[in-house]
Amino acid sequence: MKRGLERKLLIVGSIWNMFTALITIVGYSTWFKKTGIEGIQDNTVDSVVAGMTLVDNVTKVILTFGLFIFVGAIVNFLIARNIKDDEIQYKTLIWIACWALLQLVVMDIVGFVLFLIVFVIYTAKNKAIKLSQVHPESI
């Protein structure tokens, strides 16, 4: 059973994750830091120092999240390249399920739908592979 559709969808999901990670790292973190600094400028010195610390810490969390998603996108791309035809790879299935759940938790609906579709197709083809191994004469 060929795994071409899963490969293509995983690559699309990987590209989507890279896009969202770069938007998060470059766009959102810069916007958040700029807006946060503008919001605390009219306060007392103590409030400004505390606000700057808070803005810096939240910006670091945003950057860390973006980097995490970017690394996950690279892992997904590598998995897409290494999926084997006519073979059930349980670790790949677990990774796809976990990554789809993570996409749901972070409310990336497009990413969730992509990885959910990959998961369903991968699972369906796994069943077909199992059935063909049990009854090889029916191929």
Image (cartoon, rainbow, N blue to C red):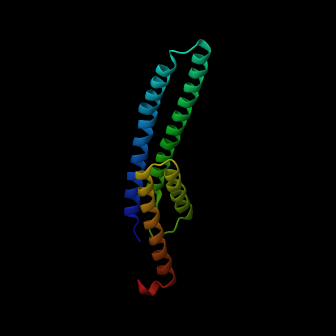
Q: Residue at x 53, y 65 (%)?
A: 89
Q: Residue at x 43, y 31 (%)?
A: 26
In front of the other: 84 or 24: 24
Quarter of the image where one finds residue 23: top left
* Looking at the image, residue 99 lies above or below residue 64: below
* Looking at the image, residue 124 lies above or below residue 55: below
Q: Is residue 43 left or right of residue 35?
A: right
Quarter of the image where one finds residue 121: bottom left
In the orientation shown, which residue stands out farthest toward the bottom? 137
Quadrant of the frame with the C terminus: bottom left
In the orientation shown, which residue stands out farthest toward the top? 45
In front of the other: 22 or 52: 52
In front of the other: 88 or 98: 98
Q: Residue at x 45, y 27 (%)?
A: 30
Q: Residue at x 58, y 26 (%)?
A: 54
| Image coordinates for residue 130, horizontal then vertical, percent | 50, 77
Q: Is residue 50 left or right of residue 119?
A: right
| Image coordinates for residue 132, horizontal then vertical, percent | 46, 80
| Image coordinates for residue 95, horizontal then vertical, percent | 54, 57
Quadrant of the frame with the N terminus: bottom left
In front of the other: 120 or 81: 120
